[in-house]
Amino acid sequence: MKEAFWQALDVLVASSPVVIDRPARTAHPRHPDMIYPLDYGYLAGTSAMDGGGIDLWRGSDAAGRLDAVICTVDVIKRDAEIKLLIGCTEAEKQTVLAFHNGSGGMKGLLVRREA
């Protein structure tokens, strides 16, 4: 069952262009004090809770493997989503997790793909 979940995500990633609309070290458009630590974007042609594409973080690992997601709950927007972590090193995963847990309004949980 778990592997089928990851395989389904692999299909989406393989068949959807990655769009990076918020490059690393740029500010959030509505919250200029929030700086994206890694490239942040979405999978084109997909949809998520907010009506946009499925969100993703892209790290520096050249292999570009999808091996984790972060499940988020935003009490201000009153929604929940997943964020795909593609090509993220262990340190980058921890950085992104801290980013999602850095405010009182949003909390995130890291879910790893089992090897």
Image: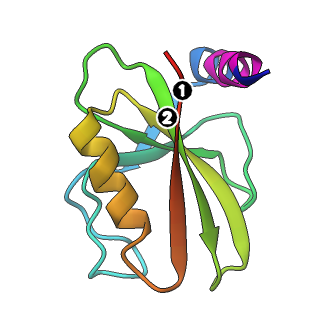
For label 1, the residue is 113
Q: Which residue lies furthest to the front in this view?
A: 114
Query: Label 2 is placed on what type of residue?
Result: Ala
Observer-nearest residue: 73 or 38?
A: 73
From this view, report whether residue 111 is shown above or below residue 97: above
Q: Mark 1 and mark 2 in contact (Cβ < 8 Å)?
A: yes
Q: Position of residue 89 (x, y in %)?
A: 26, 32
For label 2, the residue is 68
Q: Position of residue 31 (x, y in %)?
A: 37, 82
Q: Which residue is drawn at 27% across and 54% down?
A: 95
Range shown magenta: 3-11
Q: Position of residue 6 (x, y in %)?
A: 65, 22
Q: Which residue is drawn at 53% across and 56% down?
A: 109
In which image quadrant can residue 32 be found?
Answer: bottom left
Q: Which residue lies furthest to the right in this view?
A: 1
From this view, report whether residue 33 is shown above or below residue 3: below
Q: Which label belongs to residue 67?
A: none
User: Disc 2 or 1, which lies upstream in sequence?
Assistant: 2
Observer-nearest residue: 55 or 112?
A: 112
Secondary structure found at label 1: loop
Query: Label 1 is placed on what type of residue?
Result: Arg
* Left or right of 114 in this view: 91: left
Would you say residue 4 sits in the magenta stretch? yes
**Which secondary structure is most common in the magenta stretch?**
helix
Q: Residue at x 59, y 61 (%)?
A: 72
Q: Which residue is drawn at 24% across and 62% down?
A: 26
